[in-house]
Amino acid sequence: MPNTGFPAQDARNDFARARRSRVLARLATRLRHEPSDVDLILPFEEVVEALGRRRERDLGLQTIALDSIVGTVDRRREFDRSFRPTSGRVRGRWGRIARAQRQGESKPPIQVYRVGDMHFVKDGHHRVSVARAQGRRDIDAYVTEVLTAVDPERNLRLADLPLKSHQRVFYERVPLPPEARGRIQLSDPWDYAELAESVEAWGFRTIEACGELMSREEVAEAWFREDYEPIIAALHEAGMIGEETETEAYMRVVGERYLLMRSHEWDESVLERLQRAKR
């Protein structure tokens, strides 16, 4: 970090650079036509609600990467996702911390929650912002890990939370084994509800046919093995999966299947219709 030898002036320069970086980042977002929420700090409670909180555990004091800190517990808006100041309101406290850091004063570890490989600040927002502005790569933190039903991606955005919430509910209704979950990918949140209903209907018919009760876990595993995988394999072989995900292609075919169950007609026109509907 640049150093003039005058901690107070250097701290002011640190803040000015952080604010300028924020302005340039917003401009770059506009020029690249990126989503408007790409730089918004993530709210902890909304994220864990969407992902489904299971349990938490204390991991103690650790050294964590600063760029893994992308959210906050208290929904404050003074910082963006990269903890750059969003206005001049934090200048006073921010400057005092920056000056203390440049003078070699020690600061207590911050406190964070860990969700996946993301961290959310409970205490220490200004210290994180100053550390990033001064070019540090990591920071000491007391970490509490929160385990969730759905694993988050590192690039999770606010706009993704409704999709994650519907995905969580789908896995509650269709408890697939871990190795199968990664195959189920939908872009429309409501499609998860439609797919869950389809799987439950498949399970009901299977139970009727075999005359034996099945648990949700047994239905989910049997559906994936006996229905989903064979249909996907056939669609790949026929070249009938376009830009859509394989799960979206499956749902397109299943929709036709229930139509055919009523009409009892399956001919070349059906295949042509499916081909035209390929995304």
Image: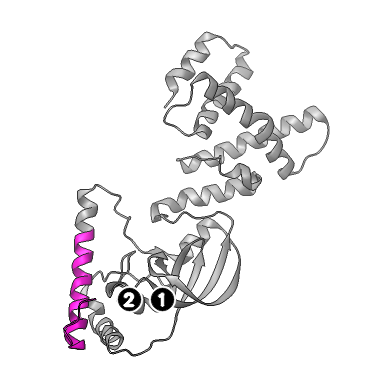
Q: Quadrant of residue 60?
A: bottom right
> Where residue 262 appears, x then y in whole percent?
62, 18
Query: Looking at this view, is 185 or 172 the one in front?
Result: 185
Residue at the farthest right position: 211
Q: Quadrant of residue 180?
A: top right
Q: Main secondary structure of the magenta part?
A: helix
Q: Is residue 222 above or below residue 115?
A: above
The residue type indicated by label 2 comes to: Ala
Query: Looking at this view, is 15 or 38 the one in front?
Result: 15
Q: Secondary structure at mark 2?
A: helix
Residue at the farthest top position: 268
Answer with left or right where residue 165 lies relative to residue 100. Answer: right
Identify the residue at image location x=25%, y=69%: 86
Quadrant where the C terminus lies? top left
Q: Quadrant of residue 66?
A: bottom left
Residue range (magenta): 1-25
The residue type indicated by label 1 comes to: Ile
Q: Which residue is tagged 1?
A: 139
Q: Which residue is tagged 2?
A: 131
Q: Is residue 154 magenta?
A: no
Asked if the residue at tag 2 contacts the one at tag 1, i.e. Cβ–Cβ closer than 8 Å, the answer is yes
> Where residue 157 appears, x then y in whole percent?
39, 55
